[in-house]
Image (cartoon, rainbow, N blue to C red):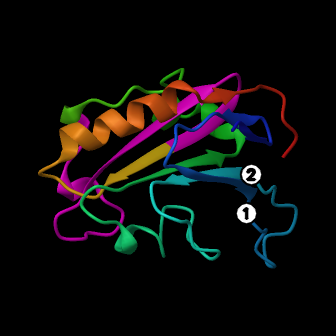
C-alpha cells in the first residue's frame, strides 16, 4: 500500500510500518519551517518517537530495522555535507555499531546526507543486529527502492 505525503512516496514491502509526518515547530523558533520526516520500521511504530528513532530503536529485536528520512531546510543543499545528489544505496560497509545516534549493544547503523531536486535529507538506518546485518540490509534495499522524492514541496 503506497504511503505518500509532503513530496515523499513509498510503497513498503510487507512487514513494514511507515509514517510520514511533519515535525512540530519549536515555540521559540519564530519563522521556522517544519519539514517532513519519514519513519519506517519492521515493528509497530510508537505514537511518540524522536526524529532519529528515540522511542523506537530500543524496541528493535535482532531481526528488525528502523529507517528515518529527515528533511533539512533547502539552504543546506549548498553546504558540503549535502553535496551528494540522489538517494544513497547503503552497502554492508556503511554500517557499524559506532554509527548509531544512541549506542545499543548488538545494533549497528548508518547515516547519509544528500539532496534531491533542491531538498536536503538525512537518511538514517538502524539494523537490529550487527551479526545479522547482511540479511537485514536485504530488507532495507527493497524498501528504499520504492522511495520517490518530489521537488517543489512547500515547507
Marks 1,2: beta carbons within 8 A: yes
91 up-or-down from 85: above or below: below
The residue drawn where x is 19% and y is 33% is 93
Q: Is residue 80 visible?
A: no
Left or right for 40, reference 101: right
Q: 14 and 39: which one is in front?
A: 14
Q: Circle 1 — which element? A: loop
Task: Name the disc covering residue 90, or none.
Answer: none
The residue drawn where x is 19% and y is 57% is 97
The residue drawn where x is 81% and y is 55% is 33
- Asked if the magenta segment contains residue 106, the reply would be yes
Rendered location of residue 55, percent (x, y): 48, 76
Q: Residue furthest left?
A: 131
| Quadrant the N terminus occupies | top right
Task: Name the disc covering residue 35, or none.
Answer: 2
The residue drawn where x is 39% and y is 26% is 89
Left or right for 137, reference 85: left
Q: CA distance from mark 1 to mark 2?
A: 6 Å
56 up-or-down from 146: above or below: below
Q: Residues within 10 Å of mark 1 (few under 14, many from 20)?
A: some
Q: 143 and 50: which one is in front?
A: 143
Rendered location of residue 9, percent (x, y): 70, 34
Disc 1: which residue: 23
- Asked if the magenta segment contains residue 114, the reply would be yes
Q: Residue furthest front?
A: 14
Rendered location of residue 59, percent (x, y): 38, 73
60 up-or-down from 5: above or below: below
Q: Is residue 138 visible?
A: yes
Q: Circle 2 — which element? A: loop
Q: Magenta segment, which residues? A: 94-122
Q: Residues within 10 Å of mark 2 (few under 14, many from 20)?
A: some
Amino acid at each position: 500500500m503506497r504511503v505518500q505525503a509532503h513530496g515523499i512516496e513509498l510503497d513498503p514491502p510487507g512487514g513494514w510500518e511507515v509514517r510520514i509526518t511533519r515535525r512540530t515547530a519549536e515555540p521559540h523558533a519564530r519563522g521556522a519551517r517544519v519539514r517532513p520526516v519519514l519513519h519506517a520500521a519492521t515493528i509497530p511504530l510508537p505514537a511518540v518517537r524522536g526524529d532519529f528513532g528515540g522511542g523506537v530503536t530500543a524496541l528493535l529485536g535482532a531481526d528488525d530495522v528502523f529507517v528515518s528520512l529527515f528533511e533539512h531546510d533547502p539552504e543546506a543543499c549548498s553546504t558540503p555535507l549535502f553535496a551528494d545528489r540522489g538517494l544513497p544505496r547503503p552497502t554492508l560497509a556503511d554500517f557499524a555499531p559506532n554509527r548509531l545516534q544512541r549506542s545499543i549493544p548488538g545494533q549497528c547503523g548508518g547515516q547519509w546526507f544528500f539532496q534531491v531536486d533542491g531538498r536536503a535529507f538525512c537518511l538514517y538506518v538502524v539494523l537490529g543486529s550487527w551479526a545479522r546485518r547482511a540479511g537485514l540490509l536485504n530488507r532495507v534495499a527493497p524498501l528504499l527502492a520504492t522511495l520517490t522524492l518530489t521537488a517543489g514541496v512547500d515547507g
